[in-house]
Amino acid sequence: MFRALSSAATGMNAQELRVSMISNNLANVSSAGYKKSRAEFQDLLYDKIRASGAKTSDQTTAPIGIEVGQGVKVAGTHRDFSLGEFRQTSNALDLAIEGNGFFQVQLPNGETAYTRDGSFKLDSQGNLVTRDGYSLEPSITMPAQAKHWTISKSGVVSAVQAGSHDSVEVGQIQIANFVNPAGLDALGGGIFARTEAAGDPVVGVPGMNGAGFVMSGFQEMSNVKVIEEMVDMIQAQRAYESNSRVIKTADEMLRTTASLK
């Protein structure tokens, strides 16, 4: 009975974490560039009451053993970097990556971070920055007298200044790609930091070396699908309820055993 109680308790804890991740996904269903996460589980060690192949007599062995599991553990949380839906905007500085890769931004501590949220703005100096004011890397500054600007699929930023009809190239957007983007460390605000698990960034021009193209005038929305999350939540709720019933049943069996005279 004690095995049943502890195993069911680990199951309830696992499903509680699963629901927490589902709720975070649903909360960010409208967050630009958000990538959904899911919990991954593994079974715990087993009590081997009898090993497979153990002798049952001088001439015979057991074809199967007797093993009792001790429950479940959370093995990790996997972030899904599949593309979200693209929403067209009227802002040329709204950028989306059609394919793999990340925009590079500079954090206040000077470190480089990575994001899929390309909702860029202009600061007081004309620099392209995120909504939190982090500068795009490499930095791009729009001319003060620019009346119109365009960003090509390959990341070339051009501007037309007042009094002129010719566009001038003012910068080149670069995309960073990772062998294992799921290994990036989420910092919040759609920002990720590099880790050893993610590998070294491969930085280059959009459309080259596996990096996606840049789409100007588009926002990549969250890749959360509400229906899928609701189905997962129902499954997690049912699993939680089932484990709680196991605890109740084991408790009743222990009570019956304790009441024997």
Image (cartoon, rainbow, N blue to C red):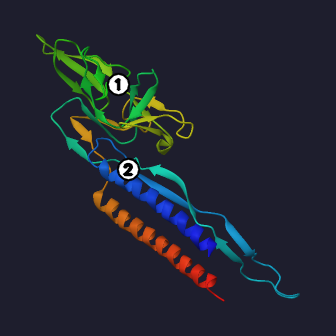
Kindly indicate the quadrant of the structure image that contains residue 59: bottom right
* Tag 1: amino acid: Tyr
Point out residue 213 in the picture as x, y percentages from the top left corner.
33, 36
Q: Amino acid at mark 2?
A: Lys
17 up-or-down from 48: above or below: above
Pointer 1 residue = 134
Label 1: state its secondary structure.
loop
Residue at 52% x, 52% y is 76
Residue nearer the viewer, 209 or 6: 6
Q: Label 2 crowding class (10 Å Cα cut-off): few <14, some 14-19, many 20+?
A: many
Determine whether the residue tagged by mark 2 lies in a helix, strand or loop: loop
Residue 75 percent coordinates (x, y): 55, 55
Q: Quadrant of residue 206?
A: top left
In this view, which residue lies farthest toward the front?
261
Which one is in front, 236 or 122? 236
- Write the residue at 28% across / 49% down: 29
Name the residue: 47% across, 42% down: 181
User: Residue 36 has which mark?
Assistant: 2
Q: Would you say 173 lies left or right of 181 here?
A: left
Q: Position of residue 122 (x, y in %)?
A: 24, 22
Most foreground residue, 84 or 216:
84
Residue 248 vertical placement versus 256 (above, below): above
**Sequence-first tag of 2 and 1:** 2
Q: Say which quadrant the C terminus sits in.
A: bottom right
- Answer yes or no: do the residues labelled 2 and 1 have beta carbons within 8 Å? no
Q: Position of residue 55 (x, y in %)?
A: 83, 82
In the displayed image of the protein, which residue is found farthest to the left?
163
- Would you place residue 256 above or below residue 214 in this image? below
